[in-house]
Amino acid sequence: MSEVILGTEIIGKNGIKLFTRLIDTNDTDKIVEIVNWAYRGKDGTNPWATEKDLVTGFRVTPEMLHSDLNTDNKLMKLMLIEHIIEDNIDGASEASEATTTTTNTVSADQKRLIIGCVKIERESLESKEAVIGMLSVDPSYQSSGIGSILVRLAEGEIIKTFNVFESHLHVVNVRDTLIAWYNKLGYITTETTFPFDVDSNVALKQIHFVLLVKNLLKK
């Protein structure tokens, strides 16, 4: 798979044109909406990737997002992906996997639609690993390869921004389909667990987080 670079245009599956960039405060409302859709469900979409039968409450609030955005970017980085929609398209070429081009501009006949986001964080400057979190895709775009693009973006930024080479994920233990998806991306399920303790969330079942780990130096 090709590298996904922050601030570049990507051609995804079926020729969809995408762009990655940092999240800023102007994106707050849309990011909060997408994250809560992704984790709690969106009407009329497939619920396979949600936690709506497991947890109640907002996955993220504007206040939580603003707190993250105010965190030192050497410890946390929040990124998004946009669908670049052409007003005048003669026809898009199909692509089975995402490819990357080196442009960071959008022309006047294009508009951008935020469709997903992800964040990376580490506990301290001395940490030897980083956690990928808030991985969210607008349910209308799920199963279109957007999630794997965001994971690759996050992994690349963990190396470039933090200079560490081990990526961690904390996944609710009963989400077998999601864990299997991460396994296909190279993540190894460990026996390490964490209690489910998330602000503004209430668990509907007995659940906990399980740790998934990936060595980013391995191809």
Image (cartoon, helix red, strand yellow):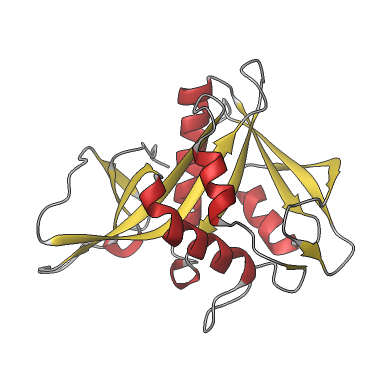
How many numbered callouts? 0
Foreground of the two, 144 or 195: 195
Q: Is residue 156 above or below residue 115?
A: above
Q: Is residue 120 above or below residue 176?
A: above
- What x and y, as percent, mark residue 132? 60, 41
Q: Is residue 134 above or below residue 22?
A: below
Asked if residue 153 shows in the view, the reply is: yes
- What x and y, as percent, mark residue 219? 54, 32
- What x and y, as percent, mark residue 152? 48, 41
| Residue farthest to the front, as pictured | 63
Q: At 15% across and 68% down in the image, what residue appears?
A: 91
- What x and y, as percent, mark residue 98? 36, 51
Q: At 79% across and 64% down in the image, what residue appears?
A: 202
Which quadrant would the N terminus be assigned to in this image? top left
Asked if residue 145 shows in the view, the reply is: no
Q: At 44% across and 68% down in the image, what residue appears?
A: 141
Foreground of the two, 142 or 125: 125
Q: Is residue 141 left or right of residue 86?
A: right
Foreground of the two, 65 or 1: 65
| Residue farthest to the bottom, as pictured | 44
Q: Is residue 162 left or right of residue 145?
A: right
